[in-house]
Image: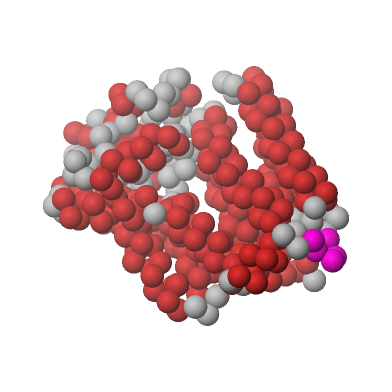
Amino acid sequence: MKKFFKNLFVAEKKSRKGLLAVEWATMGYTLFTTIFILVTWVRLAHPTEMLWFRAQAVILTLALWGVYRLYPSRLTVLFRVAGQLLLLSWWYPDTYEMNRIFPNLDHLFAGYEQSLFGFQPALLFCQTFSHPIVSELLSMGYVSYYPLFVCVTVFFFFFRYEHFERTAFIIVASFFLFYLIFIFLPVVGPQFYFKAVGTDQIVQGIFPNIGNYFDTIEFDVLNRDFILPIPGWEDGPMYKALVIAHDAGERPTGAFPSSHVGVATIAMWLAWETKNRKLFFILLPFAILLFFGTFYIQAHYAIDAIAGLFFGTAFYFLLRWVYNTTES
């Protein structure tokens, strides 16, 4: 470990002149969504602010690349990757600004849920298992979303550095693939849809089509009128952490498939790839709790979580192939 920290500051003998794969992923997503904004300009509520954010993302990426060019080392590579990871929390709410111009599809997905299970797991799961211990465990699982993939990324940086750039690319590019789905598949999840139509109708198996409802409101994360109360033990520390994280970044977007489950699945594939079974089995309980936590707190339908497993696995193998193909 002492040798590794020493190598952090050692200048690379053969530095990379161009952008990293993870940065190209950001640039590609930025370009695609910029074109989308320009084409749909008159339909969007805040197109100017959205373009300005993209300009800032490009400036940050190029600035970190410039720092690396001045002093190419493992440390400045870490700065470049960390910059892209930090931007992810800004890209997610941005999908709401784009997908709200399309008709909402929750009535279809709630209907699929009812057909598959005969009831709505997002309503009954939290009522059936309302014990504080269950609430705290599942809240902890949901909150562990960011620590899961950050932990895996950090592990690769310290112990499998030769695959660090590929790992960062797979994680960040998978987020962008999920975000593209969210833009064109406007499903907001039970917490927003059930609130909009009323849980009394949902209980009766009635799922109204609310069309462009979310394009007619100005959503405010601090206004609880647009969202169901998060179920669970309100005095629990994990519940309180969940509420803070939820209020900071949640928007009426990104329900299907669950990117929480999808990225957690990718993190578990990457953890398995390290051949460090201790790491894998330490993280596994958090991933399992996260899976059930997504519909326990009513952020997702159960089918969203199930789809997250499949999409996460597909994206992992697809992006690993893309990276290996382009870097060889």
Q: Is residue 13 magenta?
A: yes
The C terminus, quarter of image: bottom right
Near-viewer residue (87 or 71): 71
Residue 112 appears in view:
no
Please give the name of the residue rendered at 68% of the width and 66% of the height, measured from the top-left corner: 6
Nearest the camera: 95 or 74? Answer: 74
Q: Position of residue 97 (x, y in %)?
A: 54, 29
Q: Residue at x 68, y 28 (%)?
A: 51
In the depicted structure, whether residue 234 falls above or below residue 20: above
- Residue 140 seen by the camera: yes
Residue 169 in the image: x percent, y percent? 65, 58
Magenta-tinted stretch: 11-15
Q: Position of residue 207 (x, y in %)?
A: 30, 37
> Image quadrant for the N terminus?
bottom right
Q: Residue 241: within the magenta?
A: no
Q: Where is residue 251 shown, x and y percent of the image? A: 44, 34
Left-right relation of 213 to 320: left
Quarter where residue 20 is shown: bottom right
